[in-house]
Image: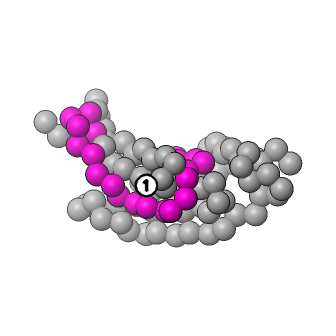
Amino acid sequence: GGPSLDNPPFFFGGELGAIYLADDFGLCSERYKIGSPLTLLEYFHQKDMVVVITKSVILAQFSLDSEGKLANETKLKLSCGPMPEKLQGVWAGPGLLATVSHE
């Protein structure tokens, strides 16, 4: 079977800065590499985008086209005070990502 509402594909990543797309059937492929360990990996459902913040405080967002290729990539450097290693984030509303770095 293919992806369905009961078992949709999902993203995961980690210390190597690679982000993978996988499913419950054992399919897994690298879809994005940012080159720094991940602090935050979120999915923005309304825009079908992945949002990432790295330990080097880079915010990146991207989507995948119908063939699974990278599309609509944007990156920017965040300014987060003296403790970037303590950065945390959470969705505060549709498209609104709130972050705190324990300042």
Quadrant for residue 69, please give it: bottom left
Does the stretch in magenta take in 41? yes
Identity of the residue drawn at 77% across and 48% down: 101
User: Please, what secondary structure does the residue beneath circle 1 have?
Assistant: strand
Quadrant for residue 72, please give it: bottom left
Left or right, 72 with respect to 29, comes to right
Q: Where is residue 66 in the image (x, y as percent from the top left)?
A: 25, 61
Q: Where is residue 27 in the image (x, y as percent from the top left)?
A: 23, 43
Can the viewer see residue 46? no
Q: What residue type is labelled 1?
A: Ala
- Return the residue at label 1: 18
Q: How is the image coloured?
A: one colour
Q: Give the range drawn in magenta.
A: 23-42
* Rendered view: 27 above or below 73: above
Does the stretch in magenta take in 34? yes
Left or right, 46 with respect to 23, comes to right
In this view, the residue farthest toward the top is 6
Q: Position of residue 85 (x, y in %)?
A: 71, 49
In this rendering, the count of numbered labels is 1
The one of 94 and 26 positioned closer to us in this rendering: 26
Can the viewer see residue 76? yes
Quadrant for residue 56, please give it: bottom right
